[in-house]
């Protein structure tokens, strides 16, 4: 399609206005690649000179995944040389259900709520051009973060701020307001035949 829309709505907007509309994007489904695709958007945003904020909600704080190193390195490169845009990486507290940090579920829920409060503050201040809310569907599904609050905040966010949310079982109200929804569907995976996770592929 080469970036061309299939229809042109009669909404009175100019081509420029339509080209610069802030988007909410959701990568959901059971297949692999949701976070990877979001980090690809973060790289594009960096190249455009945007401020990019990555907020990782679920992966264990003990893990340092490859994307975190890349994001932090690009952020340092921007500070040193002015290339690209500023990039930040924030871990919001909770770990995977089988590898959680010490602390109760209430502690993890509170960490998720605090993380969402900080994102709300930044959206209000128009801090970033792109927000990557990695694995954010889980604290919403677990009731740790209020879905209605998320939906209303995203719908009313000011300025030119793109938001991408990743994770399985994204709430219907968030899917409804999103401009782009991609569902990753697993056709085949090495785990099915007993393959273990690989460095450079899974992390």
Image (cartoon, rainbow, N blue to C red):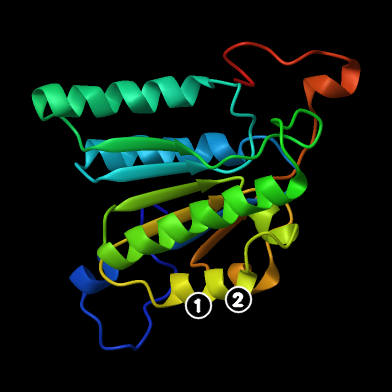
Determine the image quadrant of residue 62. Answer: top right
The one of 73 and 31 positioned closer to us in this rendering: 73
- Taking the image as shown, residue 46 lies to the left or right of residue 193, namely left
Name the residue carrying label 2.
148
- Taking the image as shown, residue 85 lies to the left or right of residue 55, namely left
The answer to whether residue 2 shows anywhere in this view is no
Report x, y in % for residue 97.
79, 37
- Taking the image as shown, residue 56 lies to the left or right of residue 130, namely right
Q: CA distance from mark 1 to mark 2?
A: 6 Å
Report x, y in % for residue 7.
42, 75
In terms of secondary structure, where does tag 2 sit? Answer: helix
In terms of secondary structure, where does tag 1 sit? Answer: helix
Name the residue carrying label 1.
152
Q: Is residue 167 above or below residue 126?
A: above
- Kindly indicate whether the residue at mark 2 contacts the one at mark 1 (C-beta within 8 angstroms): yes
- Taking the image as shown, residue 159 lies to the left or right of residue 119, namely left
Q: Quadrant of the N terminus?
A: bottom left
Q: Quadrant of the C terminus?
A: top right
The answer to whether residue 19 shows anywhere in this view is yes
Q: Is residue 2 above or below residue 13?
A: above
């Amino acid at each position: 399609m080469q970036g061309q829309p299939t229809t042109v709505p009669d909404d009175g907007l100019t081509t420029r206005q339509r080209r610069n509309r802030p988007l909410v994007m959701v990568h959901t489904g059971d297949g692999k690649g949701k976070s990877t695709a979001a980090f690809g958007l973060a790289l594009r945003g960096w190249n455009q000179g945007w401020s990019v904020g990555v907020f990782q909600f679920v992966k264990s704080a003990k893990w340092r995944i490859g994307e975190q190193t890349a994001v932090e390195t690009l952020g340092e490169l921007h500070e040193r040389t002015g290339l690209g845009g500023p990039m930040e990486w924030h871990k919001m507290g909770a770990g995977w259900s089988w590898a959680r940090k010490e602390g109760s579920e209430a502690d993890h829920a509170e960490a998720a709520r605090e993380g969402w409060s900080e994102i709300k503050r930044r959206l209000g201040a128009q801090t970033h051009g792109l927000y990557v809310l990695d694995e954010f569907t889980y604290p919403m599904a677990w009731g740790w973060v209020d879905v209605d609050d998320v939906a209303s905040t995203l719908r009313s966010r000011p300025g030119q701020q793109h938001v991408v949310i990743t994770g399985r079982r994204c709430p219907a109200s968030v899917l409804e307001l999103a401009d782009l929804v991609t569902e990753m569907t697993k056709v085949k995976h090495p785990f099915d035949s007993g393959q273990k996770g690989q460095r450079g592929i899974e992390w």
